Amino acid sequence: MMFSERLQAAINDQINAEFYSAYLYLAMSAYLEDRDLPGMAHWMRMQYEEEIFHALKFFDFMIDRGARVILKAIDAPPTEFGTVEDVFAEVLAHEQKVTALIHNLYKMAVEEGDYPTQSLLQWFIDEQVEEEKNANDVLARVRMVKDYPPGLLMIDEALAQRPAPTPPAQEAAA
């Protein structure tokens, strides 16, 4: 089965998008650290690590199929994000954008009859459901407490408990 140049280019673009996502979440982590919200900063740091794993999952897939990975420059993320609610609203919006990118890749793989890519992307489709749910859950809690400091501190404490993500290679072995 031929791995089309068009699909390879689109996956290379997705690798860039995943690394940008990581960079965005790392910038949000720094922003939240600066606002004395270490638990939320930790949550973003774990999100950063998860996005790196996503990029590497695409990277390894390309290598496994004998395709060439072409890494491109990663755009600089914003450095200011507004309120805590603004930060998590941006997380949800960003995850929805990534979901659309994954769906477009899947559509392309279906059009081309590329079953290995469809199989990979099914994992990402399922992952994006989880990503959007997690972002939406945090955003809903933040909206409940608004800017009430004790409520934000409780959310901050809860988000500090987020475990590190499982790397893709370990997932397969599990």
Image (cartoon, grey):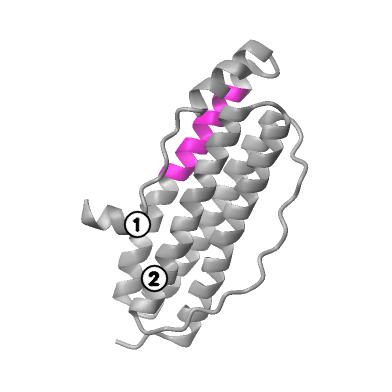
Residue visible at 50% across and 42% down in the picture: 46
Residue visible at 66% across and 65% down in the picture: 74
Q: Is residue 85 magenta?
A: no
Pointer 2 and pointer 1: residues touching (CB < 8 Å)? yes
Tell me the element at label 2: helix
Residue visible at 58% across and 31% down in the picture: 40
Relative to 93, 122 lies left or right:
left
State the mark number for residue 168: 1
| Count of numbered circles on the image | 2
The span from disc 2 to disc 1 (Cα, nearest Å) is: 10 Å
Asked which quadrant contains residue 31, the reply is top right
Extreme residue in the left direction: 174
Counting from the top left corner in percent of width and height, residue 83 is at 73, 30
Counting from the top left corner in percent of width and height, residue 155 is at 55, 21
Task: Give the amino acid at mark 2.
Answer: Asp
In the displayed structure, would residue 48 be above or below residue 53? above
In the displayed structure, would residue 143 be above or below residue 163? above
Is the stretch drawn in magenta largely helix, strand or loop?
helix
Foreground pick, 162 / 137: 162
Q: Residues within 10 Å of mark 2 (few under 14, many from 20)?
A: some
Counting from the top left corner in percent of width and height, residue 162 is at 45, 33
Task: Give the amino acid at mark 1.
Answer: Pro
Relative to 83, 43 lies left or right:
left
State the mark number for residue 150: none
Residue holding disc 2 = 60
Q: Is residue 137 magenta?
A: yes
Foreground pick, 62 / 116: 62
Mark earlier in primary sequence (2, 1): 2
Over which residues does the magenta segment extend? 130-142
